[in-house]
């Protein structure tokens, strides 16, 4: 069940069970590749495990699925900054400025 596996993935994150959480999110994303919400939850899990480069890529993907949701672009910037990638963060900031009404 999709709902139960999402709850389980979040429980794995909370329990710091990185491999199980990431594997489950990847499996879920195979079935829902165009879900911005799921992609965002996966990105957040990656951030919680310190995988900032991967998280930034997932936040960017979520934003490309749902370009009205500026939160995704803001989180991408946060992930790049956490990874120490200031040039990428600056580029994402410029993209956010262009997307902001």
Image (cartoon, rainbow, N blue to C red):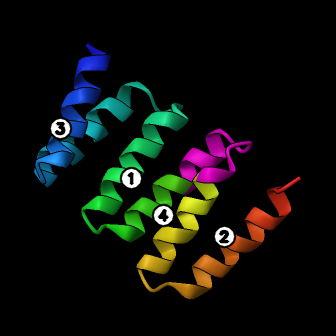
Q: Secondary structure at mark 3?
A: helix
Residue contact between numbered discs 1 and 3, judged by CB atoms under 8 Å? no
94 part of magenta stretch: no
Q: Taking 85 as reference, is 7 above or below it?
A: above
- Look at mark 4 in the image and give the residue it sits on: 56
The range drawn in magenta is 60-71
The residue singled out by tag 1 in the image is 44
In the picture, the disc for residue 11 is: 3
Instruction: Say few, some or many: other residues with alpha carbon within 10 Å of mark 3 (under 14 / 14 to 19 / 20 or more).
Output: some
Instruction: Identify the residue at image location x=15%, y=42%.
Output: 12
Label 4's element?
helix
* Disc 4 to disc 1: CB gap under 8 Å: no
Q: Are marks 2 and 4 in contact (CB under 8 Å)?
A: yes
Task: Judge whether residue 68 is colored magenta.
Answer: yes
- Counting residues from the start of the chain, the first of labels 1 and 3 encountered is 3
- Sequence order check: which comes first, mark 4 or mark 1? 1
Could you tell me if the residues under marks 3 and 4 are in contact, i.e. CB atoms within 8 Å? no
Of discs 4 and 1, which sits in the foreground?
1
């Amino acid at each position: 069940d999709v709902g139960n596996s999402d709850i389980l993935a979040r429980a794995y994150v909370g329990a710091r069970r990185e491999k199980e959480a990431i594997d489950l999110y990847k499996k879920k994303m195979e079935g829902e590749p165009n879900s911005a919400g799921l992609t965002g939850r996966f990105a957040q899990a990656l951030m919680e495990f310190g995988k900032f480069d991967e998280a930034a890529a997932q936040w960017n993907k979520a934003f490309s699925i749902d370009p009205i949701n500026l939160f995704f672009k803001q989180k991408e910037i946060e992930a790049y900054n956490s990874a120490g990638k200031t040039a990428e963060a600056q580029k994402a900031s410029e993209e956010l400025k262009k997307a902001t009404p």
